[in-house]
Amino acid sequence: MINTIRYSSQKAVEKDGRKLTIPVKPQSVLNEMGAFIQVTITHPRIIQEEFKRLGKKIPSISINALIDTGASGTVVTPKVSEV
């Protein structure tokens, strides 16, 4: 059996060659995936103002981030930091 949990309250299950979508309690998603929130990362305000002054679009990226209450720092991948 293959299980895939998305960031929702449904679970895709494949059993005996059949694909099913079943409801999942939010607590189960939290237990299996962790605490995720959607965040938008962009440049500091002073740099945003320069983009605006030049008539350019302010780059940003929206991603799902894991909340780690025991973490002592924040980490993003190089791809995210290239925005």
Image (cartoon, grey):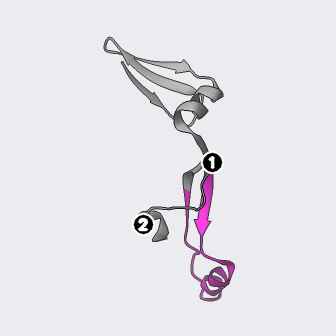
Mark 1: amino acid:
Ile
Q: Is residue 40 left or right of residue 80?
A: right
Residue identified by numbered label 1: 37
Callout 2: helix, strand or loop?
Answer: helix
Mark 2: amino acid:
Pro
Q: Where residue 48 appears, x then y in whole percent? A: 64, 80
Name the residue at 59% across, 26% down: 28
Q: Where residue 69 appears, x then y in whole percent? A: 65, 49
Residue 35: quarter of image: top right
Which residues are drawn in magenta? 38-62
> Label 2 near label 1: C-beta < 8 Å?
no
Which residue is at the far left? 17
Q: Foreground residue, 32 or 51?
A: 32
Q: Foreground residue, 52 or 43?
A: 43
Please tell me the numbered disc located at residue 78: 2
Name the residue at 64% across, 83% down: 52
Above or below, 60 against 14 in this view is below
Please tell me the numbered disc located at residue 74: none
Q: Where residue 56 appears, x then y in whole percent? A: 57, 81
Q: CA distance from mark 1 to mark 2?
A: 20 Å
Q: Earlier in the sequence, mark 1 or mark 2?
A: 1
Name the residue at 57% across, 76% down: 57
Where does the N terminus fall, quadrant-wise?
top left
Magenta region includes residue 75: no
Callout 1: helix, strand or loop?
Answer: strand
